[in-house]
Structure formats: C-alpha cells, structure tokens
Image (cartoon, rainbow, N blue to C red):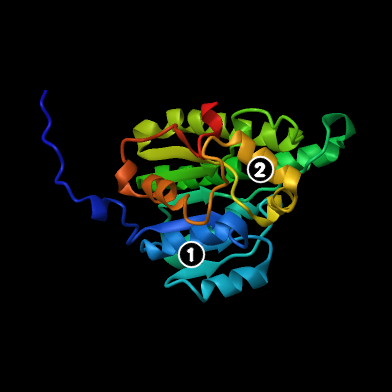
C-alpha cells in the first residue's frame, strides 16, 4: 500500500523542545558537551555524576537543567535518579547512558574485583537505568529513546592498548542495545548506541599526552586524526530526536573510519 510521505520539516525533526533527558556521566568529558548540546536543542536535562560541584556549575550554563548527584552502582541509585527526574519534570523521554570508566592493564595482571567493578559501572548500571526507564514508559504509554554510549573498543580489541574490562563491557553494551531494542520496538521505545572513536577526555588524556599514544590513534584512524569537540553532536541529536523515529538497535560509530578497517 502506498503511504503518503510526512511533511518535510527537517529542522523541527531534530528539536528536543518539550523533551526531558536523563544524562549520566555529565560532570566531565563527553558528558559535559552532551549536556550543552541537548540543552541547546531545547531539552530539559537531568544531569547525574558523582562530582556534585561540577554538576552545579554546569546547571548554571543550561536553560533548564537539574543536577542529581549519585553513584549509579550504589544500591537503588538508578531508581532514585529516575524518581528525582519524574518528581521535578513529571516525565522522561530520553536516557543517555554515558557514565563509564576505563582501566589499562594486561589481563594476566588484572584483579577480578576491579574487573567486576568496571562491568558494574559500564554495563550493569546502564542496563538497570534503561530497564527502569523502559518500565516507566511502558506503564505510561509514552514513547522514548535510550542511547547507550559505547566505543570502538566494544567493536574490536584494543591491540597494543590493553583494556580487557572496558572492551568486555562496551562489547556487552553494544549487544545489549540490540537486545533491548528488539524487546521494546513494538512498544514505542527505541534503543540505540553511539560508538565514539578517539576523543580527548579526562579518562584517556594519557593517550593524548605521549607520542606513542598519539601514534596509536592516528595510525589506526583512516582520517588520520582524533575526533574534536562537537563531532558527536549530530549522532546524539539524531538518536534523541524524532529524526530517528524509524531507527532502533543500531550503534552509530563516529570514529574517523576506525571500525572500517
């Protein structure tokens, strides 16, 4: 059956006006840029991270934001975060699971408790927040978008860069994205991911500070450079907004070609 095309209004499709976004890991790195980007697109943003002082300074920059400091691996923390967002705004529309940590060490030197903690932060906490948010959306009949921030190191191994816990967690997060998308697609909840290549943050600044680290990044990126601030904005706004209304179960790599080779 022939379907009539929707009215073409590409600018409005990317707007987040009237939407409430929960953003984890908002106190530094990619998270701070994500917060500013979401706010500029019209969203009300619930910011969470462990460093309350940094969240407070970021809230002052945004037109409509609320800080909810917490450690998402603590018992009940994801539920408390969701409750705080609903108490203040009365709704949620988007969840951006961005919080994470990374350790660099050989697998044979790893400590199993540290490995488990890395999985808790990078995989278990995003799952719990996504699960609770989806339950609320299903109970209220609202559509929603969940965006998991993965990594090129969830697509393949790090090679000379030894990151067993990070690679395991991000690889798991990518496939969890596909699984949750398949479960909730008919319910109006989209689940997608973004797989950043190399962008300088506090977590990976050691790589950018040495000639060897920069050589690893440049040599393995077909575009021959790391990403720069703002180059994730397009993917974030696309997945958070109605512009991606027929997209689910995808991980969009913004990596300068890293995963193409």
**Tag 2, which secondary structure?**
helix
User: Helix, strand, or loop for circle 1?
Assistant: helix
Q: Is residue 199 left or right of residue 41?
A: right
- Whole-percent x, y for residue 22 in the image: 50, 56
Vertical position of residue 145 compared to residue 23: above or below: above
Residue lying at 58% horizontally and 60% vertically, measured from the top left: 26
Q: Residue drawn at (35%, 31%), measured in percent from left and top?
A: 186
Q: Eyeballing the image, is 246 above or below 238?
A: above
- The answer to whether residue 25 of the structure is visible from this angle is no
> The N terminus appears in which quarter of the rendering?
top left
Of the numbered discs 1 and 2, the one sitting upstream in the chain is 1
The reply to whether dot 1 and dot 2 touch (C-beta < 8 Å) is no
For label 1, the residue is 87
In this rendering, is residue 189 above or below 259? below
Q: Which residue is mark 2?
A: 122
Left or right of residue 2, residue 44 in this image? right
* Number of residue marks: 2
63 or 103: which is nearer to us? Answer: 103
């Amino acid at each position: 059956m022939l379907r009539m095309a929707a009215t073409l209004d590409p600018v409005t499709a990317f707007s987040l006006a009237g939407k409430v976004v929960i953003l984890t890991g908002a106190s530094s790195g990619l998270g701070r840029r994500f917060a500013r980007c979401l706010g500029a697109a019209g969203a009300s943003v619930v910011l969470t991270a462990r460093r309350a002082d940094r969240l407070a300074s970021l809230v002052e920059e945004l037109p409509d934001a609320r800080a909810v400091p917490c450690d998402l691996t603590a018992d009940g923390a994801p539920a408390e975060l969701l409750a705080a967002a609903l108490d203040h705004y009365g709704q949620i529309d988007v969840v951006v699971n961005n919080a994470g940590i990374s350790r660099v060490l050989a697998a044979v030197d790893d400590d199993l408790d540290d490995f488990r903690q890395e999985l808790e932060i990078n995989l278990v906490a995003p799952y719990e927040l996504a699960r609770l948010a989806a339950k609320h959306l299903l109970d209220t009949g609202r559509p929603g978008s969940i965006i998991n921030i993965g990594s090129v190191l969830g697509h393949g191994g790090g090679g000379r860069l030894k990151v067993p816990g990070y690679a395991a967690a991000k690889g798991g997060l990518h496939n969890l994205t596909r699984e949750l998308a398949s479960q909730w697609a008919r319910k109006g909840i989209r689940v997608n991911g973004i797989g950043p290549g190399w962008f300088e943050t506090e977590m990976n600044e050691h790589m950018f500070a040495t000639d060897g680290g920069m050589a690893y990044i440049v040599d393995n990126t077909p575009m021959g450079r790391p990403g720069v601030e703002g180059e994730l904005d397009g993917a974030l706004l696309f997945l958070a907004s109605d512009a991606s209304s027929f997209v689910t179960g995808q991980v969009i790599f913004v990596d300068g070609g890293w995963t193409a080779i």
